Image (spheres, rainbow, N blue to C red):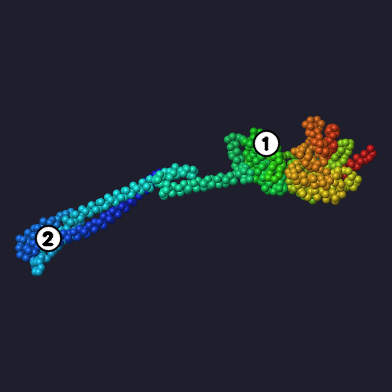
Amino acid sequence: MTPQNTGRPQTKLSLRLFKVVMLSACFIGIVLSTIQIIFDAYNSGHAIDTEAKQMLSMVRDPATRAAYRIEEEMAVEVLEGLFEIESIQYAAIVHPDQKPLAEMSRPFSKSRYRRISDQIFDRSRIYRTPLTAEEPYPDYFGDIVIHIDTAYYGRNFIRRGIVIMLSGLVRAATMALLLYLIYSLILTRPLNRMIRNLSKIDPEHPGKEQLPYLKGHRNNELGLWVRTANQLLRAIERNFNLRQKAEAQILKLSQYDYLTRLPNQRTLQKHLRRLIKNNSKQPQRFAILCIGPDHFTEINAQYNFHTGDHLLVKLADRLRDIAGNGVYTSRLGGDQFCMVQPLEQPAEAAELAQKILRDLGKPFDTVKESITIEASIGISVFPDDGHCVEELLQQAEAAMLLAKSRRNLRYQFYIASLDQEIRERKKLEADLHHAVDHDELHLVFQPQVKFSDHARIIGAEALLRWTHPEKGLVSPDIFIPLAENSRDIIAIGDWVLETGCRQLHDWQQQGYRDIVLAVNLSAIQLQDDELPDRVAQLLKKYDIAPHTLELEITETSLINDVERSCRQLRAIKDIGVKLALDDFGTGYSSLSYLKRFPFDKVKIDRSFVDGLPENSENNVIVNAIIQLGKSFKMTVLAEGVETLQQEQYLTCQECDEGQGYYYSKPVSPDAFESMIRDQNREYGNG
Ligand code: C2E
Ligand code: MG
Ligand code: MG
């Protein structure tokens, strides 16, 4: 409790006030009384003189007569008369020669006051008056002398003085008391009440309750005080609230990401540390899922940062919805998010990852555009993969990067061998950068056949091969994602297009005019605005009929920016080049793609052809794709045909074309050329 609330200081103040007032009043009382006493002393002195003169004048005549007649008896009588008056101590009638005719005296009064009064009036006062005859004979007969004992006057004077002093003091004290009472009634008590009211104010909410006005004091200074205090309390409350809000805001900013309102990396690390600490009391396995949208930098470049930010906010909202109870969601920074999921079994992490990928695959409506993204997820598991927060996070991130670089793998659990793999991938990515310049790339060609024409080769798909100086042949499934990641795919893709066109030109020169060459295009290439012009330029340069070139695009390349993809494909289509939708069925298999985009051909992914005709599930899918393609008047090609049974089944289902090891693996240009040469010879012979 603060000292103001004890009630004691007010008492102290009153006491002090009382003392000051009392002492001041007493001092003033003493001073005034002293002045009055001094004045009285002055008056008393005068009174002694006046009385003495009156006495002398009273006895002057008889004394003159006694002196004139020189009658001692008479003189004594006169003196005896005078001695009736108590204050006369000595009296004498003297001759002109100063010899006394008669004299009388008595002892001085033994008054106890005289020690003081003698100081003021002297011990005795002597008065003398000459005894003379009346006019016209003013003869001098001697003097009458009296000595006045001042003790009698002094006693009265001192008694009066005491009364004056005491009454003065009592008066002053009474006034002081009265003043004190008035003061305490008008000021101290209301002040005490105000202090009591003030002490009831809740310091946490000073503005919540107002101080009440004291009765009768609304319009005076006390009322003003209460009003001002109330204003002050309200202002304090306001400032307090503002400060609290600001503090909460600062705390939130330091713990949460400003954009998505999700906990930031620091808060996530704290959360993980707590989980790991609690693990000693109550063992709990948990998974860390590192989630990152693919090609986010391109999305930012393609639209603008505002759209990118908006997309991140929407993405965070969706992750929050997916997470539900028990799963902790946070933003790691940049375009990466993290979820912490308590686990019974590691399989639960895979289920969550699949759910996230499914939900993130639905289009996001940002301010202007509808954007569809793909994401990759890396997963590390505590305590299996490590016990250190930083290590677990790094592992999850590394696993995510690996997932990003792999085509058909959208989520990846951390495994110890991953670190080495990631390092190798980075090295591979760096090596790939020089592959074009170092002449390490070449194309192989896989024939495509027409079922209705006895499986005659009608074209080929150009497939890229990279011969690494140390590792030898590297699969495009490994290096194409790396090239996409580093954007080297633009240069590499251009090399493929040019080499393919040159090869097609050679074949056409040799008379194989109807051969159609299919070239794969990456999603990154599709974003390049110069692509249609480049294609037209190559067709012109190598004098190729546009319809003999076919560009293959996977479904997933289209979804990043549907509008732009559509524009690009139409521009290419306008040149006369054919378009094929590659790997159909592995992406979103959306009807709207078939409807919106100007495809001439749809290629059934080889995973559906696999197991035909036994696999009934694949039967259904393949049939559906063939029907769908037909209804859109597209040519349908089946990839990965490996057996006669598959070919027979596909032919039965009226699939138009096929491609696969059953006919040929991808081969060198010379081998392909000899294949068509042989075929032509055969047909020619036939
Ligand atoms: P894709 O475009 O779907 O190419 C077909 C892939 O299936 C080729 O693999 C081919 O060798 C393989 N294949 C063909 N028939 C069969 C079969 O009967 N059985 C099996 N098991 N596989 C068969 P490859 O050459 O390894 O290429 C893999 C992927 O790499 C391609 O898939 C394509 O997406 C990509 N790719 C290849 N070359 C290029 C290129 O020049 N540019 C781009 N952007 N991507 C390319
Ligand atoms: Mg292809
Ligand atoms: Mg394919």
Residue sitting at x 25%, y 53%: 165
Task: Name the front one of labels 2 and 1.
Answer: 2
Q: Is mark 2 within 8 Å of ligand 1?
A: no
Q: Position of residue 120 (x, y in %)?
A: 20, 59
Q: Quadrant of the C terminus?
A: top right
Q: Which type of secondary structure does the marked residue at label 2 adopt?
A: helix
The answer, for residue 418, to whether it is visible in the render is no
Q: Position of residue 263 (x, y in %)?
A: 61, 42
On residue 193, the disc is none
- Give the residue displayed 71% in from the left and 43% down from the top: 370
Asked if one can make out residue 684 in the rendered structure from this viewpoint, the answer is yes
Kind of residue indicated by mark 2: Met
Mark 2 closeness class: few <14, some 14–19, many ≥20 residues within 10 Å: few
* Sequence order check, earlier mark of 2 and 1: 2
439 or 96: nearer the viewer = 96
Q: Position of residue 526 (x, y in %)?
A: 77, 46
| Quarter of the figure with the N terminus | top left
59 relative to 478 in the view: left or right: left
Residue beneath label 1, please?
352
Amino acid type of disc 1?
A: Leu
Checking the image for residue 58, the label placed there is 2
As measured in the structure, the alpha-carbon distance from the residue carrying label 2 to the one carrying label 1 is 139 Å
Label tally: 2
